[in-house]
Image (cartoon, rainbow, N blue to C red):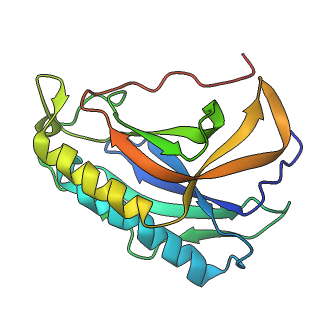
Amino acid sequence: MAFQPCPSVVSAAMHMATWDNKDVVNVWHYNLGSTTLDSTVADAITADLTTFYNRIKAYVFSGNSYAKCVITDLRTEGGPQFIVLSGLPDDGTSGADPLPGQNAALITWTTAFRGKEGRGRTYLGGFTESAITSGVLTSGLVSAFETGIDDILGHPFTVLSRVKDNVLRDEGVHHNITDGTIHTHMATQRNRSFLR
Protein backbone atom coordinates (compact mmCIF):
# COMPACT_ATOMS: atom_id res chain seq x y z
CA MET A 1 0.00 0.00 0.00
CA ALA A 2 1.32 3.46 -0.89
CA PHE A 3 2.09 5.93 1.87
CA GLN A 4 -0.86 8.12 2.82
CA PRO A 5 0.17 11.47 4.34
CA CYS A 6 -1.88 12.69 7.28
CA PRO A 7 -1.17 16.43 7.71
CA SER A 8 -0.51 17.56 11.31
CA VAL A 9 -0.95 14.03 12.73
CA VAL A 10 1.29 11.59 14.58
CA SER A 11 0.16 8.20 15.84
CA ALA A 12 0.74 6.92 19.35
CA ALA A 13 0.50 3.13 19.58
CA MET A 14 0.28 2.02 23.22
CA HIS A 15 1.24 -1.65 23.55
CA MET A 16 -0.09 -3.86 26.34
CA ALA A 17 1.75 -7.11 27.01
CA THR A 18 -0.84 -9.54 28.38
CA TRP A 19 -0.44 -12.35 30.87
CA ASP A 20 -0.99 -14.87 28.04
CA ASN A 21 1.77 -13.39 25.82
CA LYS A 22 -0.38 -11.30 23.49
CA ASP A 23 0.50 -7.80 22.25
CA VAL A 24 -2.64 -5.65 22.42
CA VAL A 25 -2.31 -2.26 20.72
CA ASN A 26 -4.42 0.87 21.02
CA VAL A 27 -3.56 3.42 18.33
CA TRP A 28 -4.27 7.04 19.20
CA HIS A 29 -3.82 10.06 16.94
CA TYR A 30 -2.44 13.40 18.05
CA ASN A 31 -2.64 16.76 16.27
CA LEU A 32 0.97 17.94 16.39
CA GLY A 33 0.50 20.68 13.80
CA SER A 34 3.87 21.77 12.42
CA THR A 35 5.83 20.99 15.62
CA THR A 36 8.90 18.86 14.99
CA LEU A 37 8.55 15.32 16.35
CA ASP A 38 11.57 14.57 18.51
CA SER A 39 12.18 12.39 21.56
CA THR A 40 11.05 15.15 23.97
CA VAL A 41 7.71 15.55 22.15
CA ALA A 42 7.30 11.76 21.92
CA ASP A 43 7.90 11.47 25.68
CA ALA A 44 5.29 14.20 26.34
CA ILE A 45 2.63 12.48 24.20
CA THR A 46 3.34 9.19 25.97
CA ALA A 47 3.05 10.93 29.35
CA ASP A 48 -0.39 12.26 28.30
CA LEU A 49 -1.49 8.70 27.51
CA THR A 50 0.02 7.10 30.61
CA THR A 51 -1.96 9.60 32.71
CA PHE A 52 -5.10 8.21 31.07
CA TYR A 53 -4.06 4.56 31.51
CA ASN A 54 -3.05 5.15 35.14
CA ARG A 55 -6.65 6.13 35.89
CA ILE A 56 -7.90 2.63 35.01
CA LYS A 57 -4.99 0.36 35.98
CA ALA A 58 -6.57 -0.58 39.34
CA TYR A 59 -9.06 -2.61 37.24
CA VAL A 60 -6.45 -4.08 34.87
CA PHE A 61 -5.08 -7.56 35.61
CA SER A 62 -1.73 -7.48 37.41
CA GLY A 63 -0.28 -9.85 34.78
CA ASN A 64 -0.91 -7.25 32.05
CA SER A 65 1.50 -4.40 31.47
CA TYR A 66 1.51 -1.24 29.35
CA ALA A 67 4.92 -2.01 27.88
CA LYS A 68 5.80 0.68 25.32
CA CYS A 69 4.40 3.50 23.22
CA VAL A 70 5.44 3.85 19.57
CA ILE A 71 5.11 7.41 18.28
CA THR A 72 5.16 7.71 14.46
CA ASP A 73 5.08 10.86 12.33
CA LEU A 74 2.31 10.38 9.73
CA ARG A 75 2.88 13.73 8.04
CA THR A 76 5.63 12.68 5.63
CA GLU A 77 6.85 9.37 4.27
CA GLY A 78 9.85 8.15 6.25
CA GLY A 79 9.09 10.57 9.10
CA PRO A 80 10.62 9.88 12.49
CA GLN A 81 9.44 7.16 14.85
CA PHE A 82 10.23 6.83 18.55
CA ILE A 83 9.76 3.84 20.85
CA VAL A 84 9.08 5.38 24.24
CA LEU A 85 9.79 3.39 27.38
CA SER A 86 9.85 6.35 29.78
CA GLY A 87 7.48 5.57 32.67
CA LEU A 88 6.85 2.12 31.22
CA PRO A 89 6.25 -0.74 31.75
CA ASP A 90 3.27 0.10 33.88
CA ASP A 91 1.49 -2.96 35.28
CA GLY A 92 -2.17 -3.38 36.09
CA THR A 93 -2.79 -3.75 39.81
CA SER A 94 -5.92 -5.92 40.09
CA GLY A 95 -5.37 -9.38 41.54
CA ALA A 96 -8.85 -10.63 40.55
CA ASP A 97 -9.26 -13.19 37.76
CA PRO A 98 -8.80 -11.75 34.25
CA LEU A 99 -11.78 -11.40 31.92
CA PRO A 100 -11.62 -13.18 28.54
CA GLY A 101 -9.47 -11.30 26.04
CA GLN A 102 -12.35 -10.29 23.79
CA ASN A 103 -14.05 -8.31 26.59
CA ALA A 104 -13.39 -4.61 26.20
CA ALA A 105 -14.58 -1.31 27.55
CA LEU A 106 -15.70 1.05 24.78
CA ILE A 107 -15.22 4.81 24.57
CA THR A 108 -16.85 6.68 21.71
CA TRP A 109 -15.29 9.99 20.70
CA THR A 110 -16.96 12.95 19.05
CA THR A 111 -15.58 16.00 17.29
CA ALA A 112 -17.02 19.25 15.94
CA PHE A 113 -17.55 17.42 12.62
CA ARG A 114 -20.92 15.67 12.47
CA GLY A 115 -20.17 13.10 9.77
CA LYS A 116 -18.90 9.55 10.22
CA GLU A 117 -15.32 10.72 9.90
CA GLY A 118 -15.83 12.90 12.96
CA ARG A 119 -16.50 10.00 15.32
CA GLY A 120 -14.11 7.45 16.73
CA ARG A 121 -13.91 4.48 19.07
CA THR A 122 -11.37 3.13 21.48
CA TYR A 123 -11.66 -0.44 22.78
CA LEU A 124 -9.72 -1.13 25.97
CA GLY A 125 -9.17 -4.60 27.41
CA GLY A 126 -7.11 -6.38 29.99
CA PHE A 127 -9.62 -5.97 32.82
CA THR A 128 -10.52 -8.37 35.61
CA GLU A 129 -13.76 -9.63 37.06
CA SER A 130 -13.57 -6.82 39.63
CA ALA A 131 -14.23 -4.36 36.77
CA ILE A 132 -17.78 -5.58 36.17
CA THR A 133 -20.94 -6.42 38.06
CA SER A 134 -23.60 -8.38 36.13
CA GLY A 135 -21.94 -7.44 32.82
CA VAL A 136 -21.86 -3.72 33.62
CA LEU A 137 -18.75 -1.70 34.40
CA THR A 138 -18.47 -0.87 38.11
CA SER A 139 -19.15 2.71 39.13
CA GLY A 140 -15.51 3.03 40.21
CA LEU A 141 -14.25 2.08 36.74
CA VAL A 142 -16.78 4.36 35.04
CA SER A 143 -15.62 7.22 37.25
CA ALA A 144 -11.96 6.43 36.46
CA PHE A 145 -12.76 6.45 32.73
CA GLU A 146 -14.62 9.76 33.00
CA THR A 147 -11.59 11.35 34.67
CA GLY A 148 -9.32 9.80 32.03
CA ILE A 149 -11.54 11.14 29.23
CA ASP A 150 -11.20 14.61 30.75
CA ASP A 151 -7.40 14.11 30.67
CA ILE A 152 -7.55 13.24 26.95
CA LEU A 153 -9.77 16.25 26.20
CA GLY A 154 -7.06 18.48 27.69
CA HIS A 155 -4.71 17.55 24.81
CA PRO A 156 -5.02 17.69 21.01
CA PHE A 157 -5.97 14.06 20.42
CA THR A 158 -7.84 13.61 17.17
CA VAL A 159 -10.04 11.25 15.16
CA LEU A 160 -8.25 10.33 11.93
CA SER A 161 -10.19 9.32 8.83
CA ARG A 162 -8.23 7.52 6.11
CA VAL A 163 -11.16 6.15 4.09
CA LYS A 164 -14.27 7.69 2.53
CA ASP A 165 -16.98 5.62 0.81
CA ASN A 166 -14.73 2.51 1.09
CA VAL A 167 -11.96 4.26 -0.86
CA LEU A 168 -8.59 5.22 0.58
CA ARG A 169 -8.23 9.01 0.62
CA ASP A 170 -5.22 10.71 -0.99
CA GLU A 171 -4.43 12.09 2.46
CA GLY A 172 -5.87 11.49 5.89
CA VAL A 173 -8.35 13.95 7.39
CA HIS A 174 -8.44 14.60 11.12
CA HIS A 175 -10.78 16.31 13.57
CA ASN A 176 -9.81 17.15 17.16
CA ILE A 177 -11.74 15.26 19.84
CA THR A 178 -14.24 17.42 21.72
CA ASP A 179 -15.98 14.81 23.89
CA GLY A 180 -15.88 11.17 24.91
CA THR A 181 -18.42 8.76 26.36
CA ILE A 182 -17.69 5.54 28.22
CA HIS A 183 -20.25 2.80 27.57
CA THR A 184 -21.26 0.95 30.71
CA HIS A 185 -21.53 -2.52 29.12
CA MET A 186 -18.55 -4.57 27.97
CA ALA A 187 -18.12 -4.64 24.19
CA THR A 188 -16.30 -6.73 21.60
CA GLN A 189 -14.46 -5.05 18.75
CA ARG A 190 -15.80 -6.22 15.41
CA ASN A 191 -13.84 -6.42 12.18
CA ARG A 192 -13.56 -2.88 10.79
CA SER A 193 -11.77 -3.82 7.56
CA PHE A 194 -12.94 -1.77 4.60
CA LEU A 195 -11.39 -4.14 2.05
CA ARG A 196 -13.51 -7.23 2.80
Q: Looking at the picture, tell me which residue is in the foreground, 61 or 28.
A: 28
Query: Which part of the image, by quadrant, shows the C terminus?
Result: top right
Question: How far across and down, in percent of the image, does residue 1 sit?
Answer: 86, 39
Residue at 54% over, 46% down: 111
Q: Position of residue 103 (x, y in %)?
A: 32, 29
Give the residue displayed 34% in from the left and 31% down from the top.
101
Near-viewer residue (7 or 115): 115
* In the rendered image, the vertical position of residue 118 relative to residue 45, given as above or below: above
Whether residue 92 appears in this view of the structure is no
Q: Quadrant of residue 79?
A: bottom right
Farthest residue, direction top: 196
Residue 192 seen in this snapshot: yes
Is residue 68 positioned above or below 35 on the image? above
Quarter of the image where one finds residue 7: bottom right
Left or right of 17 in this view: 11: right
Residue 153 in the image, given as x and y percentages of width and height: 43, 60
The residue shown at (25%, 59%) is 55
What residue occupies the far bottom of the structure in this picture?
Answer: 40
Where is residue 41 drawn, in percent x and y?
59, 79
The residue lying at 20 percent from left, 44 percent from top is 142
The tally of labels here is 0
Residue situated in front as seen by the camera: 33 or 141: 33
- Residue 46's place in the image compared with 66, above or below, is below
**Looking at the image, is 180 positioned above or below residue 148?**
above
In the shown orientation, is residue 68 left or right of residue 41? left
